[in-house]
Amino acid sequence: MSVLAQIAQEGLPAADQQNIEAAGGAGMAYGLAAIGPGIGIGYLVGQAVQAMARQPESAGQVQTTMFLGIAFTEALALIGFVVFILLKFV
């Protein structure tokens, strides 16, 4: 009997079921952690484009500030990814 057939017949051991549940929870946590930075970056870029359209002479300064804001906001998503990896493998 193959291993897959045996698992299908008997079910997964309790430890494996807990690992699958933990991985699912970690995936959901990372998904939720990515929502905030995604909204933040979208809002930031939208406001920067609006500011550059209103005052084209200050576009360079607005663009620099926008990229700094994107970097800081993206750091939040990376922190969420690190937490996801820690929850999955620890």
Image: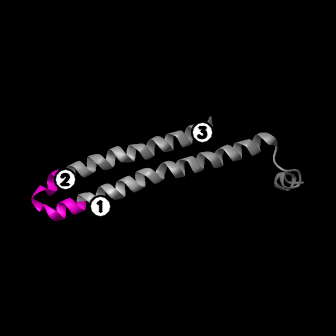
Tell me which label, 3 or 1, sits earlier in the chain.
1
Q: Is residue 21 above or below residue 44?
A: above
Identify the residue under disc 1. 46
Residue that appears at 16% across and 51% down: 61
Residue that appears at 12% across and 62% down: 56
Q: Nearer the viewer, mark 3 or mark 1?
A: 1
CB of mark 3 within 8 Å of CB of mark 1? no
Q: Is residue 5 above or below residue 72?
A: below
Identify the residue under disc 2. 62
Residue that appears at 22% across and 48% down: 65
Q: Is residue 43 above or below residue 87?
A: below
Segment tinted magenta in the rendering: 49-62
Q: Rate crowding at label 3 as few (under 14), some (14 to 19) or many (20 or more) other CA atoms within 10 Å.
A: some
Callout 1: SS:
helix
For badge 3, the amino acid type reads Leu
For badge 2, the amino acid type reads Val
For the N terminus, the quadrant is bottom right
19 left or right, relative to 31: right
Q: Position of residue 90 (x, y in %)?
A: 62, 34
Magenta region's main secondary structure? Answer: helix
The residue closer to the viewer here, 40 or 27, is 40
Tell me which label, 3 or 2, sits earlier in the chain.
2
Q: Position of residue 41 (x, y in %)?
A: 35, 54
The residue closer to the viewer here, 43 or 1, is 43
Quarter-of-image position of residue 88: top right
